[in-house]
Image: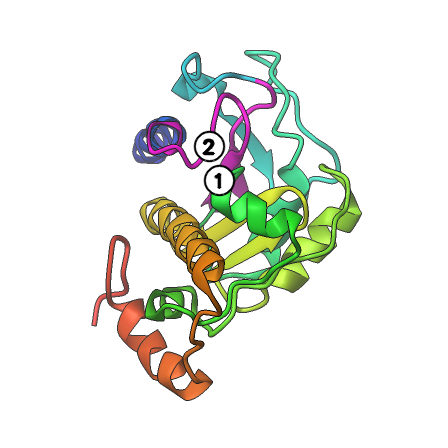
Amino acid sequence: MARKNKEERKLREAIVAGCRSMNAKHINQGAAGNISARMGDFMLITPSGVDYDDLTPDMIVAMALDAESPVIDEKTGLKASSEWRFHRDILLARPDVGAVVHAHAPYATVLSMLRRPIPASHYMIAAFGGSTIECTDYAPFGTAELSALAVEGLGPRNGVLLGSHGMIAAGPDLKRALWLAGELETLAQMHYLAGLAGAPAILPDREVLCLVEKFAAYGPGAKKV
């Protein structure tokens, strides 16, 4: 039990650090966005409406993956993120995913407002497991409709844009998911800026797909080979 508590504490601290890192890197702001991480049959998830500067490890909410409604922490009185549903549903649909990062990153959000998926205009898209990062239609935040769109749009890949909302990055662990969130915003920025100058060249699927396995072993949280 002591070992489990120690691991949980470490994960709570990592979530807080990840939230602050997102804001420091300008891929999120204030209390927008949210992070979850798998912990056995539970997930740890950021609370609703708490500015990341004020966030502490004890404020992270533990929530069973079979929960049907948002949890209120008995000790802190804080409620799980309003986006708990798509965090839960992604973790249930994707056993390979250990952490989910949602942010209102500026360029990713701009593309989501334009309903523009990100094609393979840069080879780093292979880090997300495919040749396209899809953009979903819009659904109100916190709804089952948004969760269904998020799960479908993500598919087997590790990134998706949510229409008129923001983006999601998923990874086998928190370190990888946070890295992918940063890479997704960079891809969105490069694709958007290239589009201002003309029509970006799009790499063939075969070129991207041959890089997918290489990227599985590249970067933070990569698979050991």
Give the quarter of the image for residue 122: bottom left
Taking the magenta stretch, the answer to whether it contains residue 190 is: no
Viewer-proximal residue among 30 and 174: 30
- Tag 2 residue: 28
- Residue at the outermost front position: 197
Screen quadrant of the C terminus: bottom left
| Position of residue 171 in the picture relative to residue 113 (left or right) | left
Q: Residue at x 39, y 56 (%)?
A: 190
Vertical order, 114 against 31 (above or below): below
Q: CA distance from mark 2 to mark 1?
A: 5 Å
Question: Where does residue 183 sit, x and y in percent of width and height?
Answer: 36, 52
Q: Residue at x 36, y 84 (%)?
A: 207
Question: Where does residue 114 sit, x and y in percent of width and height?
Answer: 65, 52
Give the quarter of the image for residue 84: top right
Q: Number of labelled discs?
A: 2
For mark 2, give the secondary structure. loop
Question: Where does residue 221 sit, x and y in percent of width and height?
Answer: 28, 54
Q: Which residues are magenta?
A: 22-49
- Residue at the outermost left position: 225
Question: Where does residue 196 sit, x and y in percent of width and height?
Answer: 48, 56
The kind of residue tagged 1 is Ala
- Tag 1 residue: 105
- Given contact means CB atoms under 8 Å apart, are the residues at marks 2 and 1 in contact? yes
Q: Residue at x 79, y 49 (%)?
A: 145
Viewer-proximal residue among 87 and 7: 87
Could you classify mark 2 by the number of other residues whose Cα lies within 10 Å: few (under 14), some (14-19), or many (20 or more)? Answer: many
